[in-house]
Image (tube, helix red, strand yellow):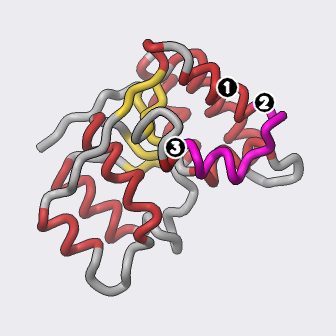
Amino acid sequence: MVFQMSNSFVVDTNVLVFAETHHHEKRIDAVCFVTHLWKNSIIALDAPFGVIFKQYKNNLPNTGFVFDIILRMMSKANKVTFGKRALPRTVSNDLNSPPMFDINDLIFIEVAYATRSNIVTEDIQSGDFDSRVKNTCKENIGIDILTILEANNTIMRAR
């Protein structure tokens, strides 16, 4: 089993978009998370200016505070970790069995696996990171998939 770095997070793009969306119901929690991330945590990415960064760049306003924080974190060695690792066959097989997992989101799990990070997303109940995916990741590779609120609580407990 892999043990996570409790203060390292792979952040699904939707979380960051919520922080920039003024009238979104989860905006306050998302802004809180981004602030906690900047002050107390590490962001995990696949590579400098890699696939995840490109998703952020394509979905966030370049002049927004969230994109600015991501760039600032990437410029500080103690605020970012990089890595990507192929998943064990049992995990890949489970994710590729019906209902199919969105292959575009596989990068988040591969980065979490390589960097021993938690994943933060709001795509949990009926989205790509449903209970089957969440259980597969937890049981087979020790990765927690958290909502924004759960991530905020994790960061506050670690302080």
Q: Give the Cα distance between marks 1 and 2.
A: 6 Å
Residue 155 at x, y percent in the picture:
48, 26
Dot 2 or dot 3: first in sequence order is: 3
Residue 28 at x, y percent in the picture:
76, 39
Dot 1 or dot 3: first in sequence order is: 3
Q: Which residue was labeled with disc 2?
A: 65
> Does the segment drawn in magenta span residue 64?
yes
Give the residue type that dot 2 points to: Phe
Give the residue type that dot 1 points to: Ile
- The residue depicted at 44 percent of the width and 72 percent of the height is 102
For the residues bearing labels 1 and 3, Cβ distance under 8 angstroms: no
> Relative to 41, does residue 92 appear above or below in the rendering?
below
> Relative to 148, does residue 9 appear above or below in the rendering?
above
Helix, strand or loop at mark 2: helix
What label does residue 69 carry, if any? 1
For the residues bearing labels 2 and 3, Cβ distance under 8 angstroms: no
Left or right: 40 in relation to 111: right
Q: Which residue was labeled with disc 3?
A: 11
Left or right: 138 in relation to 51: left
Q: Residues within 10 Å of mark 2 (few under 14, many from 20)?
A: some
Is 129 in front, or is 74?
Answer: 74
First to last magenta residue range: 53-65
Q: Give the Cα distance between marks 2 and 3.
A: 16 Å
| Residue 112: quarter of image | top left
Helix, strand or loop at mark 1: helix
Helix, strand or loop at mark 3: strand
- The residue depicted at 35 percent of the width and 53 percent of the height is 109
> Does the segment drawn in magenta span residue 149?
no
Q: Give the Cα distance between marks 1 and 3.
A: 13 Å
For the residues bearing labels 1 and 2, Cβ distance under 8 angstroms: yes
Residue 120 at x, y percent in the picture:
49, 46
